[in-house]
Image (cartoon, rainbow, N blue to C red):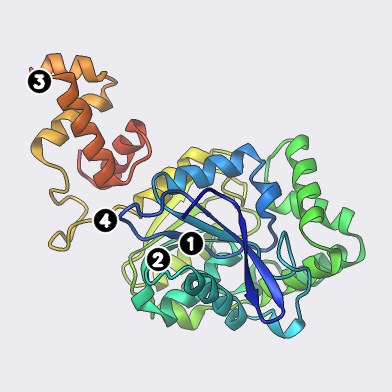
Amino acid sequence: MGPPGIRFLSLGDRRLAYEVRGPADSGEPPLVAPAWWVSHLELDWQHPGVRRFWEGIAADRTLIRYDRLGVGMSDRVVGESELTLDAEVATLRAVCDELGLHRVSLVGGSSGSCTAVAFAAEYPERVDRLILYGAYARGDVLTPPGVAEAIVSAVDAHWGLGSRVLGDIFLGRADAADHDRFAGLQRASATAQTAAALLGMVYRLDVRDHLAAVRAPTTVVHRRDDRAVPYRLGREVAAAIPGATLVPLQGSSHFPWHGDVDSVVRACRSGMVSLPPEQTSPGAALLSAREKEILRCVARGLSDREIAEQLTVSPHTVHRHVANIRRKLSSPSRTAAVADATRLGLL
């Protein structure tokens, strides 16, 4: 895939910015992240939390992100007729087609979860797994009646004030520096008019009719005190998708790169573990008896050398087994492997 960098896809007479990170061929379907409300590929990557989240999610996989038309590094022109779910799905498909991606895993966050659900329902043959964070099925219940219109009007009339209002909603109990950074990034990512128009679309999205048609293994991760998208809405999404797993987390920030980032990464990666076809339950023998024995030692905090001495094998053998364990569980670290295996009932 080449080194990370911003690339451009022509959509009619406009250009959509996207980036590809990670290895060209990891042996696993690439991770594609449908666009959130507003974003900026260059500026948001400068935030340590954003990097920690996406690098943790992707680990050794290919990751594709993009700025939707009208925001970030994409052309800053978007028409009212394009602010629809169908247009969002078409953009996601255009990105996948441009890169020749026939089968992908989707990481859909916030409003991007609606795009991910609709795409998975319409193109089931192209979606390997679905990871949803801060998800909802209908935007008109995100706020009490009348509040959404007031928020959109505030953003449209005074972007400085509007971005701070949204910060209070999205960031939860973040500190003043995070609020300042968030407000600045939003204003750099879109004009007031575009941000308001896109926010209006967020409140109009409705994928209730798509949920039952999703066939990909789905994990829904949601913080219990999320103020932007209440926890009950994520629970409803998980309940409506056949076989979906809900992973509740503590925290109040809507953005996964604020607060306890690592817990979100672990929860999302738990849904990326591929079980062999004949295994139908998380407790099946994904790991060999020796690998489980070694992982139990890792869970006790033993080093490779200490494990080798205990099991009377070489440190190299232990290192190789740990690498195989992490590969099988798609875990970015030893600690994550223990957490993933525990969640799957393998320890």
Find disc 4 in the rendering and name its residue: 274
Q: Amino acid at mark 1?
A: Val
Q: Earlier in the sequence, mark 2 or mark 3?
A: 2
**Residue 86 drawn above or below residue 303:** below
Q: Earlier in the sequence, mark 1 or mark 2?
A: 1
Q: Earlier in the sequence, mark 4 or mark 2?
A: 2
Q: Quadrant of residue 152?
A: bottom right
Q: Nearer the viewer, mark 1 or mark 4?
A: 1
- The residue drawn where x is 30% and y is 52% is 273
Q: Is residue 309 left or right of residue 302?
A: left
Judge whether residue 186 can be spotted in this image. Answer: yes
Find disc 1 in the rendering and name its residue: 32
How far apart are the alpha carbons under marks 2 and 3? 39 Å
Where residue 64 sits: x, y (%)? 51, 58
Q: Residues within 10 Å of mark 1 (few under 14, many from 20)?
A: many
Q: Quadrant of residue 111?
A: bottom right
**Which of 189/218 is in front?**
189
Do tag 1 and tag 2 residues touch (Cβ < 8 Å)? yes
